[in-house]
């Protein structure tokens, strides 16, 4: 029986900050002090507060150590684990109150969260099936195959109001019901773990922190629709997730929780792993299934929908990782429990990857209907450097920007669609006043153009033309007619592209045009980038009254564009200036500004 448990984040973020070396150092120090039988080191998934990684929590005290370094380990083991003295300098300060340690759940980052899909992430060792079982793992599968009919399972999912967490929010129960209604000698259950949106890492974190939740849910889905085979399509760029999924699959087979005659019920179900090469278009369901079949990942027209004719021409359901992560909890706790969270039309919680210009980057799970302000200012800790919130991008390249005027919007599927954005998989990128919205639209278009499969002309050619017009505008060469053409082409692509990815590709342009049209017009009419981002429109100027003539700027300029004498104001030759910004960074007197 251990007296202390040390939980160390083993997710991708913390691993990149040396958490594996921290775990190794911990085990060595614990062994050196003879504490192996008293202290248990647990490698977990993501805790969520990625900005403070590597993260370590020591129980039973609940001490939350943040930004831990390998060199801190001897002190933690000696002082805390051996002598019982908390190393206060390493504590996450939000957990310290009047010389006592308060619950992590009562810190601003966690207080408004409700962890359902992430319930086991940062809590259990994802590579040990017994720890998942100890948290009621596979109890839902056992209940389903021994006590419920397939129709009863589908009814619970329908009644719960669960909507797909990977895109437009199609009701999960309806999708399952459609597949169940189609008779076939073989059906399939697929999982979309090909998370391709820039800044999104929700599904990856679930796979790394709680892989058995996915396996259990897919088996439940297989029972509900009459399928005996499942496939997880995961990108090879997620090595930790792939490794833990394979370990989980091996363990589930060993325990008889996958394969033949599960729970002695006569139900057979197995799951295979398929690795994707990182093509964004393979996040679209028909392209994903084509890729699983070993063909080039390209979308197909719908109907017929996959529930009628999907993988290998058989009825197939496809949900993403987060959608599946809710299934077992709904079965165990009931549809009403799930509906008690969220809004009437968007039940439950949503996981967001919070990134960009925000103090607390990380993974958050909040009830649907939580306002953007609560996420940004309370959970996310606000904007760094005292700057103002400007916009948030949801839904990645398929989504849109939410401006400051909608900071109090309640986030759910319908509200986001109403203002020209969408939920998407859950990436939420925060932008401050230093962000150029035309440049942001251009960034997402560059991504879409690069990732287009090229099958349909509206996407292959149309997005390329959009990008060319945006490039022209950011260089100060655009006209007001270009802005009109930009908008017209956006709607044409939306109406004529083959798949959902092509149809939503113009969304970042349309939403920035809708809420930040004045920025487009400033680029065109005034040849000026209000945010000072677009290089072609920038001009660095030295304010004579502030310049002390220290010569630091002249010495750092790589092209010799700055001239002046010691203790006298300097000047910048705009013809020579390459707009690298080195002079502005070097100036200690704020004498250099961007115009």
Image (spheres, rainbow, N blue to C red):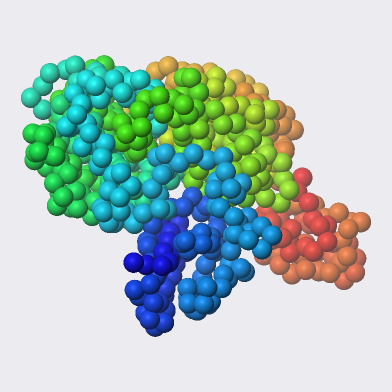
Q: Is residue 423 visible?
A: no
User: Residue visible at 59% across and 36% down?
Assistant: 392
Q: Up-down: is 308 above or below 526?
A: above
Say above or below: 115 vs 482: below
Q: In this view of the protein, can residue 108 be seen by the observer?
A: yes
Residue at horizontal 76%, vertical 66%?
Answer: 554
Horizontally, residue 508 falls left or right of residue 317, namely right
Going by the picture, which residue comes out furthest to the bottom?
32
Q: On the rendered image, what quadrant is the C terminus found in?
A: top right
Left or right: 1, with 398 as reference point: left
Is residue 42 placed above or below 109 in the rendered structure? Answer: below
Q: Quadrant of the N terminus?
A: bottom left
How many numbered tags mark residues here?
0
Q: Nearer the viewer, residue 269 or 184?
A: 269
Residue drawn where x is 15% and y is 30% of the image: 227
Q: Nearer the viewer, residue 138 or 187?
A: 138
Q: Position of residue 10 (x, y in %)?
A: 40, 59
- The image position of residue 379, as x and y in percent, is 59, 43
Provide residue 324's location: percent of width, then percent of height: 32, 35
- Snapshot quadrant of residue 270: top left
Whole-percent x and y of residue 272? 18, 43
């Amino acid at each position: 029986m251990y007296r202390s448990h040390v939980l160390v984040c083993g997710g991708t973020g913390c691993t990149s900050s040396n958490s594996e070396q921290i775990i190794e150092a911990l085990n060595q120090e614990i062994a050196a002090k003879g504490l192996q039988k008293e202290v248990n080191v647990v490698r977990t998934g993501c805790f969520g507060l990625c900005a403070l990684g590597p993260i370590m929590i020591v129980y039973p005290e609940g001490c939350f150590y943040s930004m831990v370094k390998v060199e801190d380990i001897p002190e933690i083991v000696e002082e805390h684990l051996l002598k019982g003295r908390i190393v206060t300098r390493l504590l996450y300060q939000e957990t310290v109150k009047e010389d006592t340690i308060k619950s992590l759940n009562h810190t601003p980052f966690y207080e408004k969260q409700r962890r359902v899909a992430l319930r086991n992430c940062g809590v259990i060792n994802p590579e040990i099936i017994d720890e998942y079982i100890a948290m009621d793992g596979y109890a839902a599968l056992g209940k389903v195959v021994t006590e419920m009919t397939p129709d009863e399972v589908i009814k619970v999912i329908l009644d719960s109001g669960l909507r797909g967490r990977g895109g437009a929010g199609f009701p999960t129960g309806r999708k399952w019901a459609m597949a169940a209604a189609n008779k076939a000698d073989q059906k399939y259950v697929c999982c979309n773990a090909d998370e391709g949106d820039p800044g999104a890492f929700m599904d990856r974190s679930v796979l790394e922190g709680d892989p058995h939740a996915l396996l259990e849910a897919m088996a439940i889905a297989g029972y509900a629709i009459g399928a005996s085979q499942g496939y997880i399509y995961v990108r090879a760029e997620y090595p930790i997730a792939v490794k833990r999924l394979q370990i989980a699959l091996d363990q589930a087979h060993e325990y008889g929780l996958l394969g033949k005659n599960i729970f002695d019920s006569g139900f057979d179900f197995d799951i295979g792993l398929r690795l994707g090469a990182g093509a964004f278009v393979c996040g679209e369901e028909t392209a994903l299934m084509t890729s699983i079949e070993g063909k080039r990942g390209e979308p197909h027209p719908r109907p017929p929908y996959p529930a009628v004719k999907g993988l290998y021409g058989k009825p197939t359901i496809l949900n993403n990782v987060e959608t599946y992560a809710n299934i077992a909890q709904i079965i165990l706790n009931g549809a009403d429990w799930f509906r008690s969270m969220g809004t009437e039309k968007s039940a439950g919680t949503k996981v967001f990857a919070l990134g960009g210009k925000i103090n607390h980057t990380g993974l958050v799970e909040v009830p649907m209907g939580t306002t953007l302000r609560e996420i940004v200012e309370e959970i996310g800790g606000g904007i760094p450097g005292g700057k103002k919130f400007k916009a948030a991008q949801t839904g990645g390249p398929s989504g849109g920007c939410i401006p400051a005027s909608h900071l109090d919007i309640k986030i759910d599927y319908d509200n986001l669609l109403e203002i020209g954005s969408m939920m998407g998989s859950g990436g939420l990128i925060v932008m401050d006043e230093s962000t150029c919205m035309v440049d942001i639209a251009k960034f997402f278009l560059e991504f879409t153009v690069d990732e287009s499969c090229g099958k349909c002309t509206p996407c292959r050619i149309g997005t390329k033309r959009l990008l060319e017009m945006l490039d022209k505008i950011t260089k100060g060469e655009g006209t007001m007619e270009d802005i009109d053409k930009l908008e017209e082409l956006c709607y044409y692509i939306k109406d004529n592209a083959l798949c959902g990815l092509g149809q939503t590709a113009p969304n970042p342009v349309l939403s920035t045009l809708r809420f930040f049209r004045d920025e487009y017009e400033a680029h065109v009419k005034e040849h000026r980038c209000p945010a000072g981002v677009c290089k072609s429109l920038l001009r660095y100027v030295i304010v004579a009254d502030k310049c002390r003539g220290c010569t630091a700027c002249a010495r750092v300029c790589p092209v010799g564009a700055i001239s002046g004498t010691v203790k006298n104001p300097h000047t910048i030759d705009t013809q020579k200036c390459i707009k690298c910004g080195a002079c502005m960074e070097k100036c200690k007197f704020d004498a250099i500004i961007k115009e």
